[in-house]
Image (cartoon, rainbow, N blue to C red):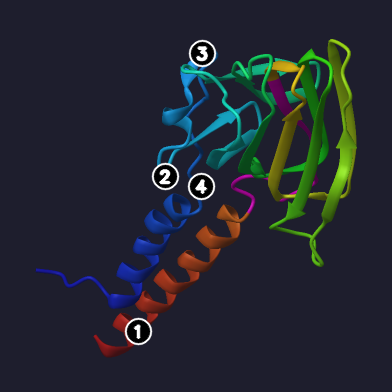
Amino acid sequence: MRRVSPIVGVAAAALFVLPLSALSAWAAPCSTAATPISVYTAAGFSCNVGEVTFSNMSVTVNTGSIGANPTISALIVGNENALEFNYSAGAGTTTDVTFEYNVAAAPGFLLTDAASSLTGIAPATLSESLLGTGNPSPPLSLVGQITLVLPTTSTGFTLITPPQTSLLATKDQLTGANGEASALINGFSVTAVPGPIAGAGLPGLIAACGGLIGLARRRRQRTA
């Protein structure tokens, strides 16, 4: 039985393993249907809207109430890949709720702006904090860039400069005693960045493996 050279075996293994290891995991799409927030805030849950992945979500009611059936759903508004947080703050009470999550751009993209929209009855405000958790370094830190004051629906945008691969976003929504809020939309735009073409390194890998195989053959011929 002819023995396979260890060099040949390593070369073959490299051809098989390296392309598989280059594949990156990507979350499943977020549902466009109204889904209980308990699904989104479960440990380890993540999902994507377009080229944006949301994960590690938490909803904290600091004061007041957001009703019995708050939900989250996915939507795309213009260039914004967004989640909509629907709830009922209720009139006649002060409600302060914090919505926090990690957001990341798909491989080959960067986050370039954040958009927020708040629907309800005045008075109500929304404050936003964005902290860069990826590249570039030093990370981005934007605090209090958006404060929305209703009458009915208000929308604000924050440019992410420099663009980021990932962020920790914290949205704090406050209604006054006479106010009521029902929908909070959080969206992000992305832009593609130049990068290596998929598989561009494969020809070089094949050539290198071919050289290893040739070397193994020459060694066998010398020892024959």
User: Residue 34, which numbered label?
Assistant: 3
How many angstroms separate mark 1 from mark 4 (CA)? Answer: 38 Å
Which residue position holds label 1?
Answer: 219
First to last magenta residue range: 184-200
User: Residue 44, which numbered label?
Assistant: 2
| Residue lying at 74% horizontally and 49% vertically, measured from the top left | 195
* Residue 160, quarter of picture: top right
In this view, the residue farthest toward the left is 1
Question: Is residue 18 left or right of 145 when viewed as pictured?
Answer: left
* Residue 141, quarter of picture: bottom right
Q: Is residue 187 magenta?
A: yes
**Dot 2: element:** loop
Front of the two marks 3 and 2: 3
* Residue 180, quarter of picture: top right
> Which tag, 3 or 2, sits closer to the chain's start?
3
User: Residue 24, which numbered label?
Assistant: 4
Front of the two marks 1 and 3: 3
What amino acid type is highlighted by mark number 2? Gly
Whole-percent x, y for residue 114 in the image? 81, 35
Q: In this orientation, which residue lies closer to the viewer: 37 or 97?
A: 97
Q: In this orientation, which residue lies closer to the viewer: 88 or 191?
A: 88
What amino acid type is highlighted by mark number 3? Ala
**Dot 4: element:** loop
Q: In this orientation, which residue lies closer to the viewer: 150 or 203?
A: 150
What amino acid type is highlighted by mark number 4? Ser
**Dot 1: element:** helix
> Which tag, 1 or 2, sits closer to the chain's start?
2
